[in-house]
Each structure stands twice: as structure tokens, then as C-alpha cells.
Amino acid sequence: MSHVSEHHPGYTLRECAYADVLGLVEEADRTEALLQRRSDDAPFHRIVDQVYGGHHGYQVFVLTDASSRPVGFTMTLPEADARTVSIGPTFISRSLRGKGLGKRMILDIIEWARVRGMARLLVATWGSNRAARGTFEAVGFRFTDEELNTRVNGDSTVTYELALANAVVGN
């Protein structure tokens, strides 16, 4: 998949190897953008290695700018139900946040899943991450659960799902 967004000319989302996004993963680690860690928690890249490293079928996507510089990434992981995919960590470089690139990336993943015959997407985020929650809700994800996660500074984990037949595409 290589998709150039009509809403964000010059930005392309494409499938890639995990190694292609390591610089962004390191940025996420430095800014703690993906994990609200305690000092004794593993860095984000170790968690990703544990979660994704042992699973076959996970996919990494990189968002690049007009110079082919990586500026964001997301991951997907197939669920036991062959027609369901979970969207994993999603990150946009700090300098580009608030420009709608995260939403564009999620819309592209929705289209990627549709083309592959998937029926449902799942995603989880921190309860305090209002930007991510707003993005997921704006494209049609439905809130399904909230669980207190005391290991992560007391923040909750909020889960959403999207039946692809109900997805908003092209926003």
C-alpha cells in the first residue's frame, strides 16, 4: 500500500518494516508520547518488541513527508477472528501534531483493512488522550470499554471498535 492523501499533499502512508520507524519509536520513547511510564517501566520499543515480535501477521506503516522523511507510524495486528484487526501504537512527530495527519493515517488504515476484506477494527488508547479519542470517534469508532490501569500512573485504557461498513471515509 502506498497512499498519498488528497487532504495532505506530500504525505504518503506505506507498509514498511519495523526497522524503518525506529527513529520515530525513539522519539516516542523520549517524549513518552505512547506510554505514560513510571521510571521502572520498559521503554516503548521493548514493549513493542514483546507485543508484536512474537506475532505473525503484524504490519507496520510509516507516514512520510514530501522528502520521504518518516514523520509518523502505526501498526496493526490480526486478531483470532480472521476478519478483525487491532490498530496498535500510532504516533505523529511532535512538530506535526494538530494538523490532521493522525486522522488521515487512521482513515488510510480503514481503507487498507477494507480492501483486505476485514470486517472490524479495534483500537485502545489512554483515557486521558483526548486527541486520539476524538480522532477515533470522528471516523466512526464506537466506545466499548474503559478499564483502570494502575500500572500506568492510574490512567484508564479506553477501547473502541469500528464495523467497517459504518466507517466514514474521505474526511
Image: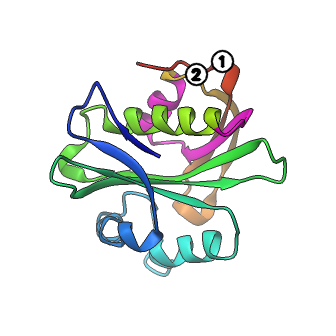
Q: Which of marks 1 and 2 is nearer the N terminus?
A: 2
Residue 126 lies in the magenta stretch: yes
Could you tell me residue 34's position as x and y percent? Answer: 43, 58
Location of the C terminus by quadrant is top left
- The correct choice, above or below, for 41 with respect to 14 in the image is below
- The correct choice, above or below, for 132 with respect to 171 in the image is below
Could you tell me residue 10's position as x and y percent? Answer: 20, 39
* Residue at the farthest right position: 81
Could you tell me residue 42's position as x and y percent? Answer: 50, 79
Task: Name the residue: 37% across, 69% down.
Answer: 20
Task: Name the residue: 32% across, 64% down.
Answer: 24
* SS of the residue under disc 1: helix
- Left or right of 65, for residue 62: right
Nearer the observer, disc 1 or disc 2? 1
Count neighbours of disc 1 (C-alpha within 10 A) and say few if under 14, some if 14 to 19, many if 20 or more.
few
The residue identified by callout 2 is 140
Q: Which quadrant of the view contains residue 161?
A: top right
- Left or right of 117, for residue 10: left
- The correct choice, above or below, for 68 with respect to 7 in the image is below
Are circles 1 and 2 on residues that touch, CB within 8 Å? yes
Q: What stretch is highlighted in magenta?
A: 116-137
Task: Name the residue: 78% across, 41% down.
Answer: 83
Residue 85 lies in the magenta stretch: no
Count neighbours of disc 2 (C-alpha within 10 A) and say few if under 14, some if 14 to 19, many if 20 or more.
some
Q: How far apart are marks 1 and 2 (CA)?
A: 7 Å
- Left or right of 26, for residue 168: right
* Amino acid type of the residue that numbered disc 2 sits on in the rendered structure: Gly
Q: Which quadrant of the view contains residue 101?
A: top left
The residue identified by callout 1 is 166
Query: In front here: 124 or 111?
Result: 111
* Amino acid type of the residue that numbered disc 1 sits on in the rendered structure: Asn
- The correct choice, above or below, for 123 with respect to 94 in the image is above
